[in-house]
Image (tube, rainbow, N blue to C red):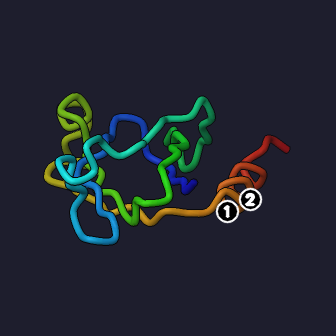
Amino acid sequence: MKYFFLSEGWEVGRVWELGGLWNEIAWRRKPQIEQMTVCIWENNEKLWLYRVEDAVLMVEVKPTPVAVTVTPENAIGQVVLKRLISGDQAIDILCANLPK
């Protein structure tokens, strides 16, 4: 499994696998992307941990329509490609954000 952190109010857009964009017809299913019940706070922003299957190489994320109306100066037209991390890297980030 691979992981990434995503700001609250953002959603997953396109997904890439080894052959390019995820093709639901070829795979006969959507990619497995699951929001976990763990989050961290970084720079006053809530970041949720997501788990994705190994076949996923990269995900595109974008603000939800609600997020755009709430914070237009920060989110209008933004799309970000998220780099995926390993389970060990996710644990390191979670541990670094534990209350002291």
Mark 2 → mark 1, Cα distance in angstroms: 5 Å
Q: On the rendered structure, is 26 left or right of 6? A: left
What amino acid is labelled 2 in the image?
Asp
Say which residue appears at 31% left-offset and 40% top-offset.
11
Percent of width and height locating residue 49: 55, 43
Rendered view: 60 above or below 98: below
Q: On the rendered structure, is 7 left or right of 79? A: right
Mark 2–mark 1 CB contact (< 8 Å): yes
Say which residue appears at 74% left-offset and 59% top-offset.
92
Q: On the rendered structure, is 52 left or right of 99? A: left
Percent of width and height locating residue 14: 23, 53
Rendered view: 74 above or below 19: above
Residue placed most toward the observer, 60 or 22: 22
Numbered label tally? 2
Percent of width and height locating residue 85: 56, 63
Q: Give the residue pinned by disc 1.
A: 89
Per the image, label 1 sits on a secondary structure element best described as helix
Residue placed most toward the observer, 89 or 54: 54
Label at residue 92: 2
Residue placed most toward the observer, 16 or 38: 16
What amino acid is labelled 1 in the image?
Gln
Rendered view: 84 above or below 47: below
